[in-house]
Amino acid sequence: MARPRKFDEGTVIEAARNQFWHHGYEGTSMAQLCEATGVASQSLYGAFGSKHDLFVRTLDDYCGSQVTGLAQSEGAASDSWAWLMAAVTFEDDGRLGLTRDGCYLSDSAAALSRLDDKVRDASQRTFTEILRVFATALTRAKAQEAVRADVNVEEAALALLVAMQGVEFLRKSGLDDEQFEKAKAGTIAALSQAFTIRGEK
């Protein structure tokens, strides 16, 4: 009979994710993961498999929660264009906030997606879901007469994703807070000029 686990799986995944996030996959050892999670290596291996398996689990967990949170906050938004601008600048209330460490998915994809099929699949799947949420919000914004009727929703969603990833990159690039806030404001102004009724005037 298997012995019951003496740790909370969600807490361990979060602690492991933070370790990978701050130090990178290659820069994180199993000894460091044991210290960060407070779980012995034998128990970690027994519960999650290899270091790589644990990493993929943390990434899948992060991506799932981020996409779910994004979709839920979009569904609750009354002003779809304002919500999109909040999402692009990581000010929406559905996801983990953007820190100077950037986005866990973006960091993982940049470091490993060319070499790791599971990381590449996770990034492709997540960005596809984000595009779907953005397209839904853009369609709502059109119905609310905020976005111009001639805007191609799929192309605009891609532009918003690119802008969001640019904001993420700037946050972890060392840009100071004042410059970062100006960059976010400029991004919102440029997107509004490109796609909204207000920008048409």
Image (tube, rainbow, N blue to C red):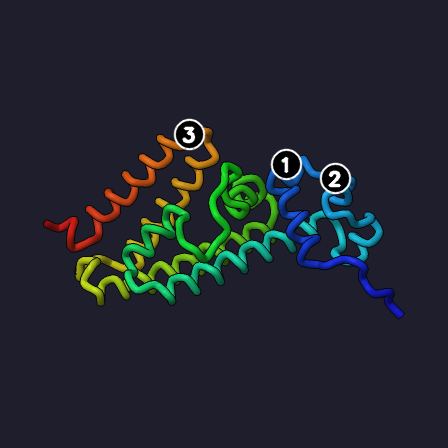
Which residue occupies the extreme right position in the image?
Answer: 1
Name above or below for residue 131 compared with residue 159.
below
Q: Which residue is mark 1?
A: 23
Whichever of callouts 3 and 1 sits on the residue coming sooner in the sequence is: 1
Q: Percent position (x, y) of residue 25?
A: 65, 41
Q: Percent position (x, y) of residue 64?
A: 54, 60
The numbered mark at residue 175 is 3
- Element on which disc 2 rests: helix
Mark 3 is surrounded, within 10 Å at the Cα level, by few (under 14), some (14 to 19) or many (20 or more) other residues, namely some
Instruction: State how far apart marks 2 and 1 are (Cα).
Output: 10 Å
Instruction: State how far apart marks 3 and 1 are (Cα).
Output: 20 Å
Residue 64 shows up from this direction: yes
Amino acid type at circle 2 is: Gln
Q: Is residue 2 left or right of residue 23?
A: right
Name above or below for residue 17 compared with residue 28.
below
Amino acid type at circle 1 is: His
Q: Percent position (x, y) of residue 147?
A: 21, 58
Residue beneath the point at 49% across and 54% down: 124
